[in-house]
Amino acid sequence: ELRLTTDAYKTLYDSSLTFGVRKQLQAEDGMGDLADQIASLQHDKEEGESKVAELTNKLEVIEKRAAERKALQEKKFKEELDFLKYQGQHLDAFLKSAGGGTGVSAGASK
């Protein structure tokens, strides 16, 4: 009976040893796949970060150009407004000196 028990334990030990070795080999095989997956994901991450940096730079350039265009447009409008005010003042002065003096354009420019 003791010998049967010892044989049973030995069989159990051998089968568990075989099972452990098989599981270790499966884990090692899976590690290679995981390493490949990690490398692929890191590459994708770097590509994504590169794309974000590129798009951020494009956005900054576009915003800068838009600000420059807006400043130029505002300057142009201001110059045109100043010219029209100047022209209106001289037209009023001319009308007053010509004897009209009604001040119609002066009321319209305010």
Image (cartoon, rainbow, N blue to C red):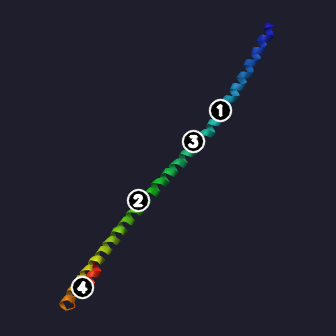
* Disc 3 to disc 1, C-alpha distance: 16 Å
Q: Say which residue appears at 72% left-offset and 22% top-offset.
A: 16
Residue located beneath label 2 in the image: 60
Judged from the image, the secondary structure of the residue bearing numbered disc 1 is helix
Q: Are marks 4 and 3 in contact (CB under 8 Å)?
A: no
Foreground tag (2 vs 4): 4
- Residue 38 shows which numbered tag? 3
Q: Are marks 2 and 3 in contact (CB under 8 Å)?
A: no
Q: Are marks 1 and 4 in contact (CB under 8 Å)?
A: no
Residue type, numbered disc 4: Gly
Q: Nearer the viewer, residue 46 or 56?
A: 56
Location of residue 40 in the rendering, given as x and y in whole percent from the top left corner: 57, 46
Judged from the image, the secondary structure of the residue bearing numbered disc 4 is loop
Looking at the image, residue 4 lies above or below residue 61: above
Residue type, numbered disc 2: Glu
Dot 1 alpha-carbon crowd within 10 angstroms: few under 14, some 14 to 19, many 20 or more: few
Judged from the image, the secondary structure of the residue bearing numbered disc 2 is helix
Foreground tag (4 vs 3): 4
Apparent side of residue 90 relative to residue 2 in the rendered image (left or right): left
Q: Say which residue appears at 56% left-offset and 43% top-offset.
A: 39
Q: Nearer the viewer, residue 88 or 82?
A: 88
Q: Earlier in the sequence, mark 2 or mark 1?
A: 1
Residue located beneath label 1 in the image: 27
Residue located beneath label 4 in the image: 103
- For the C terminus, the quadrant is bottom left
Residue type, numbered disc 1: Ala
